Amino acid sequence: MLGSGILTLPRTLAEIMKTPDGWIAIILGGLMVMLAGICIVKLCHQFPGETIYQFAGKIVGNWIGKCLGILMILYFICISAFEIRVMAEVTMLYLLEGTPLWAIIMFFMWIGLYLTSGGINPIARLFEIILPITIVVFLFSMTLSYKIFDINNIRPVLGDGILPVIKGLKSTILVFAGYEIMFIVTAVMQHPKKGVKAMIIGTSIPLFLYLVTLIMVIGAMSVDGVVRSTWPTLDLMRSFEITGLLFERFEFFLLVIWIMQIFSTFSICHYAASLGLSQIFNIKIKPLMYFLLSIIFLIAMLPKNINEVFDFGELIGNISIYLFGIVPLLLLLITKVFKKGAVK
């Protein structure tokens, strides 16, 4: 869930809501995503050891199940392309100025291929390494910005009523995209019955980090200041320096850990798309990984500028609400009503 959204969420909410109440929308959006994720896990429990690509046909019929699986594969391909394009844009702007986009994208894609070709286990091990590093560095960086934090920038609470919060709900739900990977992960969990607990914890961590991000960024830069920034979270890190320490600027630490997070999102989505094609069409997975790499690259290079990249991301997010919010609920209802699945 911790992908490119952390870099843009404060600006997105500030533009839509025009109030500092985005933290309320984040809490509500996180709870809604948590419920959708639990619904996905409960559905997977009905078909132990199978992914959505394998059991969808058992619920709604073979052809509809395959069409549904292909839609999810297309979604994972697009989210992979979007994440790696955002990563390349940020890297080019702050770290590798003048480097062609295609060079940055290809470099990270080949590293991602090396990881995903090993299967789900090395991916999971990498995630276990990245997460604690991310949390420690992120909270440390955010804590240092307290000197320019002004609590008056996040007041008043609900000054314009509840309507702006409702407007901001969709954008907050979009940044939690990633919970849908439980359609794949539940099948290979050692203790799948703990899937609900994993879903709750796995959603709570990004919820907390997004909350901290929004409060610190809005508190330091104000709503008007955030609206004028493309990458407000990084601009917050650049707006102060701590003299006397070994390092005086901290945006590079945040950049490094978020490049790792975006890389991890790309990797697992690339794997999920490859696995889907493999299971639906009974083809070996490794050739498909190479094939999809070229497709992802082409899609990542399609947007002509950063505004088109953001529009592309919003489109993907809107699709995810229906594909992984409404569809799983309908499938779960069908399994319960018609008594389908191994678990009655």
Image: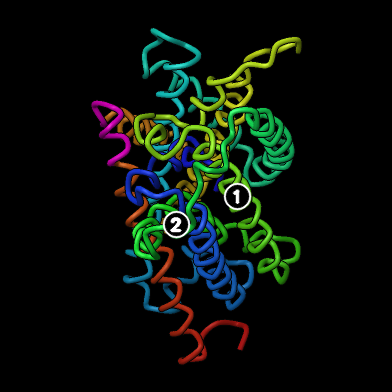
Q: Quadrant of residue 193?
A: bottom right
Q: Secondary structure at mark 2?
A: helix
- Magenta stretch, main secondary structure, is helix
Q: How many C-alpha atoms fall within 10 Å of the one at disc 2: few (<14), some, or many (≥20)?
A: many
Residue 107, compared with residue 119, is above or below; it is above
Of residues 11 and 151, the one drawn nearer to the viewer in this rendering: 151
- Which residues lie in the magenta part? 303-311
- Please name the residue that numbered disc 2 is placed on: 173
Query: Residue 72: in sight, yes or no?
Result: yes
The question of residue 132 being in magenta is answered with: no
Earlier along the polypeptide chain: callout 1 or callout 2? 2
Whether residue 70 is visible here, answered yes or no, is no
| Left/right of residue 68 with respect to residue 176 in the rendered view | left
Q: Nearer the viewer, residue 217 or 131?
A: 217
Numbered mark located on residue 337 in the image:
none
Quadrant for the C terminus in the image: bottom right
* Residue in the foreground of this view, choosing between 165 and 3: 165
Number of marks in picture: 2
Residue at image coords 64%, 38%? 118
Residue 2 picture location, percent across and down: 56, 43
Give the Cα separation between the discs numbered 1 and 2.
12 Å
